[in-house]
Amino acid sequence: MIEINLLPQGYRKGERGLSLGKTGMYAMIGVVGIVLGLVGITFYQMHQLSALEEAIEINNHRAATLRADIQVVDALSDVKTKIQRRMSAVERLDRHRSAWVRILEDMGRNVPEYVWLSKFTEAELAVAETDTATATLGRAETAPVRPIELRGYTFTLNALAAFMIRMMRSDYFDQVELVDSRDTLFVDEKAYTFQLSANVHYLSDEELQNMIAQAAGESGIKHKSLN
């Protein structure tokens, strides 16, 4: 049986829906695919962002722990450096203990009336400078020569000049120079502060015995050669 619909196109039943055709269907499928892809990418990026936030939190916690450890290590390194400096100073003083006794006794005898010392500082000297200073003084290579700084007070400049002259005549000091001198008041009395620089040279007992033995050996060789 064949049915023919003679109604106008606008009154035909079942043809009121939207007709997309094959091209429209393909386009619709493409749009749906793009939307699904964007949704998938969004969820993936959200997952990555969550993982990154967790990693950042873990690293921040680890960094805080490491900072505390670094502070402890720095503090221990500082303590180690201070201990090494003190041990070096003690070792140096012990090595030249007898020489320092003689040096300080000599300095005490050289301080005149109206002069008193407030500070005695020994400076470090490089090896090359030590060799140069030792060669200049004509001493053995084992004789240490170090620059020092003296600070003190005096009531008269004549007393300060006398102190400098006595130090120049000493066997332990040379190149004594006045670095600074200023007026001051001491118990309502006019006084002067001063700063001196000089070189101090000393020998430990062991070094002194070695030099004596070396000198005795050289004198013995010369005596044999003369005979």
Image: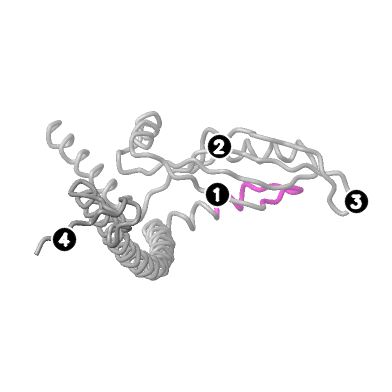
Q: Contact, CB < 8 Å: mark 1 with mark 2?
A: no
Determine the residue positioned at 49% across, 40% down: 147
Q: Contact, CB < 8 Å: mark 3 with mark 4?
A: no
Quarter of image, res 146? top left
Find the magenta span and give its range.
105-117
Q: Distance between the residues labelled 3 and 1?
A: 28 Å
Instruction: From the viewer's side, name the closer residue of 43 and 175.
Output: 43
**Of marks 1 and 2, the one in the foreground:** 1
Check disc 2 and report the residue beneath it: 169
Q: How far apart are marks 3 and 2 (CA)?
A: 34 Å
Figure coloring: one colour
Dot placed on the residue nearer the N-terminal end, 1 or 2 = 1
Q: Which residue type does callout 1 highlight?
A: Thr
- In terms of secondary structure, where does tag 3 sit? loop
Q: Which residue type does callout 2 highlight?
A: Arg
Q: How far apart are marks 1 and 4 (CA)?
A: 126 Å
Q: Is residue 113 magenta?
A: yes
**Label 1 crowding class (10 Å Cα cut-off): few <14, some 14-19, many 20+?**
few
Q: Which mark is residue 3?
A: 4
Q: Contact, CB < 8 Å: mark 3 with mark 2?
A: no
Dot placed on the residue nearer the N-terminal end, 3 or 4 = 4
Q: How far apart are marks 1 and 2 (CA)?
A: 20 Å
**Of marks 1 and 4, the one in the foreground:** 4
Check disc 1 and report the residue beneath it: 121
Quarter of image, res 144? top left
Check disc 3 and report the residue beneath it: 188
